[in-house]
Image: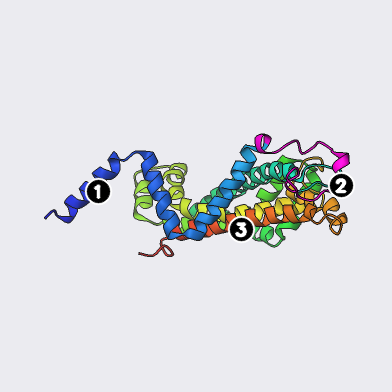
């Protein structure tokens, strides 16, 4: 009988011989079995990504007017119907997915990234540095996310990159608090103290010894914030403070025309509403599953 150490070595050797694709496939299958709802959320996200990437192929021109086909319901020709200008609602939905994904991912990358870095710096230095940064975070958290984003958009004007900045800036405090709490415990560990004792600089200790240990909670916050970012972008577009009105967005489809013609053509508001709901639902399900997998207190034995 092989000992436990020999069995562990055999498993490690077998794992090393497997290709990266095989390991990724096994990990994906295991994730689907353990977290079926999270897998369903990931499926919705993949569908959304597929729509955004293949938009020119699977949909027509969202800017083209067909005045002879105004306000037509869903059919084999117009899968999601047309609006009051005869524009294809399906094409607008598919191209709107591009805007939602771009704003969602870029704003989360910007907001969570800045918040995470400030959280590590705040926890590492402590004292007055920590007090100043956290009081700024408290002030930002006192302002509702949408109100803060609206104020920034009013000052900067409407464009996609300005929406990214406004939504991302409003998400900085959440990532800052989570990463700071993790960094406070990591900075007192033996390996961090050992690195400091041999003369490692502050930047090296934070980059190589503290930040890697904060990746798991950072990913949890980032994945959970994607749904909020999409909702914020749709809300800004709905209020006329997001991207330019000529750009097809889900929030823009819900705004003036969707409300004005809702009784006559309800599909103009139903389809973008369903798209927003499914996107946020998928990101929330996937974010909860990622939290359960990465958090040792939740993933079980």
Q: Residues within 10 Å of mark 2 (few under 14, many from 20)?
A: some
Q: Nearer the viewer, residue 115 or 299?
A: 299
| Vertical position of residue 74 compared to residue 289: above or below | above
Left or right of residue 249: residue 28: left
> Which residue has dot 2 on it?
84
Q: Position of residue 160 (x, y in %)?
A: 73, 41
Q: Is residue 54 magenta?
A: no
Q: Residues within 10 Å of mark 3 (few under 14, many from 20)?
A: some
| Vertical position of residue 172 compared to residue 246: above or below | below
- Counting residues from the N terminus, which is met first, the one under dot 1 or under dot 2? 1
Cα distance in 3D space between marks 1 and 2:
63 Å
Q: Quadrant of residue 134?
A: bottom right
Q: Nearer the viewer, residue 191 or 110?
A: 110
Under tag 3, what secondary structure? helix
Q: Nearer the viewer, residue 78 or 272?
A: 78
Asked if the residue at tag 2 contacts the one at tag 3, i.e. Cβ–Cβ closer than 8 Å, the answer is no
Boundaries of the magenta span: 56-80
Q: Is residue 58 magenta?
A: yes
Cα distance in 3D space between marks 3 and 2:
29 Å
Q: Quadrant of the N terminus?
A: bottom left
Under tag 2, what secondary structure? loop
> Which residue has dot 3 on it?
281
Q: Residues within 10 Å of mark 1 (few under 14, many from 20)?
A: few
Cα distance in 3D space between marks 3 and 1:
38 Å
Q: Which mark is residue 52?
A: none
Q: Nearer the viewer, mark 1 or mark 2?
A: 2
């Amino acid at each position: 009988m092989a000992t436990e150490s020999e069995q562990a070595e055999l498993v490690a050797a077998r794992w090393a011989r497997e290709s990266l694709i095989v390991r990724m496939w096994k990990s994906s299958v295991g994730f689907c079995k353990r977290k079926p709802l999270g897998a369903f959320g990931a499926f919705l996200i993949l569908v959304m990504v597929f729509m955004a990437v293949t938009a020119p192929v699977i949909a027509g021109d969202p800017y083209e007017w067909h005045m002879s086909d105004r306000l037509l319901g869903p059919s084999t020709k117009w899968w999601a119907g047309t609006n009051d200008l005869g524009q294809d609602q399906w094409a607008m939905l598919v191209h709107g997915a591009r805007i939602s994904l771009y704003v969602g991912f870029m704003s989360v990358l910007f907001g969570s990234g800045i918040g995470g870095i400030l959280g590590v710096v705040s926890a590492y230095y402590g004292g007055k540095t920590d007090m100043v940064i956290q009081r700024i975070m408290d002030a930002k958290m006192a302002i509702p996310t949408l109100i803060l984003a609206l104020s920034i958009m009013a000052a900067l004007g409407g464009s996609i990159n300005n929406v990214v900045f406004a939504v991302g800036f409003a998400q900085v405090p959440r990532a800052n608090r989570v990463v700071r709490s993790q960094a406070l415990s990591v900075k007192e560990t033996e390996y961090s103290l050992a690195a400091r004792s041999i003369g490692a600089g502050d930047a090296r200790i934070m980059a190589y010894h503290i930040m890697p240990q904060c990746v798991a909670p950072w990913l949890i916050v980032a994945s959970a914030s994607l749904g909020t970012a999409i909702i914020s972008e749709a809300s800004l577009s709905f209020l006329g403070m997001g991207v330019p009105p000529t750009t097809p967005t889900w929030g823009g489809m819900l705004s003036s025309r969707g409300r004005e013609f809702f009784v006559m053509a309800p599909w103009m508001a139903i389809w973008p509403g369903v798209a927003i709901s499914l996107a946020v639902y998928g990101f929330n399900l996937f974010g909860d599953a990622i939290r359960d997998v990465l958090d040792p207190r939740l993933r079980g034995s």
